[in-house]
Image (cartoon, helix red, strand yellow):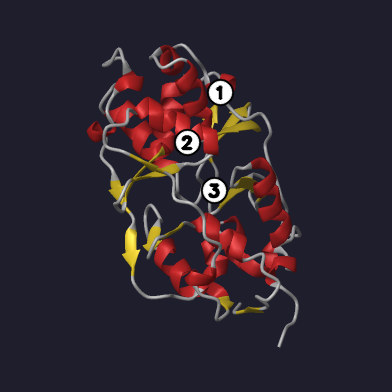
Amino acid sequence: MSTTPISEMSLESLFGDSLTASLCVNIEKGTETWVATGMLVQQLESFTDSVVVRENDKPIGIVGGKDIIIPLVENPNSSLFYNTTVENVMEKRFPTVTGKSKLKELVGFWKDTRRAFAAIPNEFSDYSALSAKKLLEVGIKVRTERSISKLPKKKTITFNEKDTIGEVLNSMLEINARRLFLADSNKFINDRIILQKITEELKCLKETENFMDLPTSEFNLEEAKNITEDLRIQEISKIMYEMEHPCVLFQDQIITPWDICLSLLSEDITEYEN
């Protein structure tokens, strides 16, 4: 039986052939931000989770939900979407790892950057994407008795029905959270839901003059999946892997793929099924 923590194992040994299976989603420099926003509605919480900005095929940065929301709060009108191009909002670092990188290096890098995305060179002389959801593939294969009740408890940040979307967005940025829960419920709002409302109903704010004053009751909240059993890491990983937008509620505890990423750093998780 191995005594090496899986956090010390390389990404290629953990993922095998599936390591480069999730190709990056790309957008060209010079493209207006509304295009990237529509793409993010499809990609956030998926296996890619961000959009890669390219110039002449070369990656020069990435755009995630936060990269739209920060300038949106500063200037909540349609000019962000129609008079701004992606290179003006993107994260200019293009984070890369290799198959030799250890799991703890990847998650450690994500903790430092507060952004769970990395690109990895693939067999097509291009890049594939790694995200928190992608790491659930590792969670599914660990062999541990550790259960979700043993995951670190974190405070649930909530909002009220009377709150405006501006108050919600400011809370998200203040605590660097992508998801807030409606008080006393399993319903939540996140960056994807907000961007979806902006692109599909508000025509990238051409349809509203006072976006930040909109009540949150006008947004289509989603529900976290309620789990009543104290499942093991591998079991909860499988459930979330199969969810389009993974978020689970166990008692008063919210669990997302990021919690699984952090749990995989535990030195007592040493058994792994290849």
Q: Which mark is residue 89?
A: 1
Q: Residues within 10 Å of mark 2 (few under 14, many from 20)?
A: many
Q: Are marks 2 and 1 in contact (CB under 8 Å)?
A: no
> Between disc 2 and disc 1, whose residue precedes?
1
Q: Residue at x 65, y 48 (%)?
A: 110
Residue 82, given in percent of the width and then of the height, sits at: 42, 14
Closer to viewer: mark 3 or mark 2: 2
Left or right of residue 204: residue 95: right
Element carrying mark 3:
loop
What element does badge 1 sit on?
A: loop
Q: Where does label 2 land, which residue?
A: 172
Q: Are marks 1 and 3 in contact (CB under 8 Å)?
A: no
CA neighbours of label 3 inside 10 A, class few (<14), some (14 to 19), many (20+):
some
Q: From mark 3 to mark 2, how far is it between C-alphas?
A: 29 Å
Name the quarter where the N terminus is drawn. Answer: bottom right
Query: x%, y% of residue 270?
Result: 68, 78
User: On screen, 177 above or below 10?
Assistant: above
Q: Upstream in the sequence, badge 1 or badge 3?
A: 3
